[in-house]
């Protein structure tokens, strides 16, 4: 089973200035760190970078990836996300049966790629699953904006949190399915994905300046 990784990354970010390319930790940017993690996993046949930042093309040999230029209209946060997914997946020079791991730079604490690929191959070989999604378990009491409990009930029958039904949050760290499915469905989550559970640290997503600083703190603690 051939499996490739794709890193979709934009030159500019709206909420965090130069989020992907300024120094993050140990002299590396989020982008450089993610490339290092993907190579260290040693489980991908090819690593692609889809971006409007054309200067990255000059770093293909240095960082070991294949650059695919993405039109700026697919990087403006206006184009619907399904259209972006379709464009990125369709641009990969791979056949439809190739499995694609969609990897975000904004998950710097996540590096379990080899384990995920092994789980994906094992689970999908049985026919019960057709993809993999990285998730984080939620053990919290959830209520809607209408003040209605979602995963429990108020009253003397109120359960302890460890007895709540399993609920998961998609953390955005990794999605895997076949290229054909991403292109056809214009989505990174397949119809029947296997949930690969990660911990709170690995699930950190860098979306704000505070997230950036928090992720830096956690990286320091990992050493």
Image (spheres, helix red, strand yellow):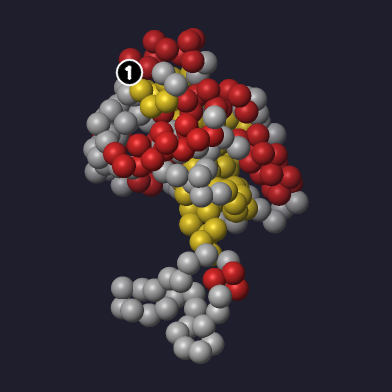
Q: Nearer the viewer, residue 184 or 75?
A: 75
Could you tell me which residue is drawn at 50 percent across and 45 percent down? 201
Q: Residue at x 32, y 18 (%)?
A: 54
Q: In this view of the protein, which residue sits in the foreground, 83 or 13?
A: 13
Image quadrant where one finds the N terminus = top right
| Rendering coords of residue 2 (x, y %) | 66, 31
Q: How many marks?
A: 1
Q: Does 113 appear above or below 138?
A: above
Left or right: 66 with respect to 123?
A: left
* In the rendered image, the vertical position of residue 7 relative to residue 191, given as above or below: above
Q: Compared with residue 40, is residue 163 higher up or lower down, i.e. above or below?
A: below
| Place of residue 157 in the rendered image (x, y in percent of width and height, measured from the top left) | 54, 87
Residue on which the image places disc 1: 54
In percent of width and height, residue 38 lies at: 56, 27
* Element on which disc 1 rests: helix
Quarter containing the C terminus? top right
Question: Which residue: 60% across, 35% down?
Answer: 113
Q: Quadrant of residue 177?
A: top right
Q: In this rendering, does residue 204 appear at all? A: yes
């Amino acid at each position: 089973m051939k499996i490739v990784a794709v890193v979709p990354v934009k030159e500019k970010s709206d909420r965090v200035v130069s989020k992907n390319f300024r120094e993050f930790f140990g002299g590396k940017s989020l982008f450089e760190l993610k490339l290092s993690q993907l190579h260290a996993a040693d489980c991908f046949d090819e690593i692609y970078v889809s971006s409007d930042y054309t200067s990255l093309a000059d770093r293909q040999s240095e960082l070991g990836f294949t650059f695919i230029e993405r039109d700026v209209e697919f990087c403006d946060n206006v184009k619907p996300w399904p259209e972006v997914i379709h464009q990125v997946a369709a641009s990969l020079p791979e056949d439809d049966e190739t499995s694609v791991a969609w990897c975000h730079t904004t998950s710097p604490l996540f590096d379990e790629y080899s384990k995920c690929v092994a789980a994906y191959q094992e689970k999908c070989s049985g026919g019960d699953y057709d993809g993999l999604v990285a998730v984080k378990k939620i053990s919290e009491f959830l209520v809607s904006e209408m003040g209605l409990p979602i995963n429990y009930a108020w009253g003397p029958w109120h359960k302890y949190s460890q007895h709540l039904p399993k609920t998961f949050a998609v953390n955005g760290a990794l999605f895997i399915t076949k290229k054909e499915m991403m292109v056809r469905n214009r989505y990174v989550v397949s119809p029947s994905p296997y949930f690969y559970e990660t911990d709170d640290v690995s699930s950190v997503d860098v979306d704000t300046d505070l997230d950036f600083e928090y992720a830096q703190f956690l990286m320091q603690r990992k050493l």
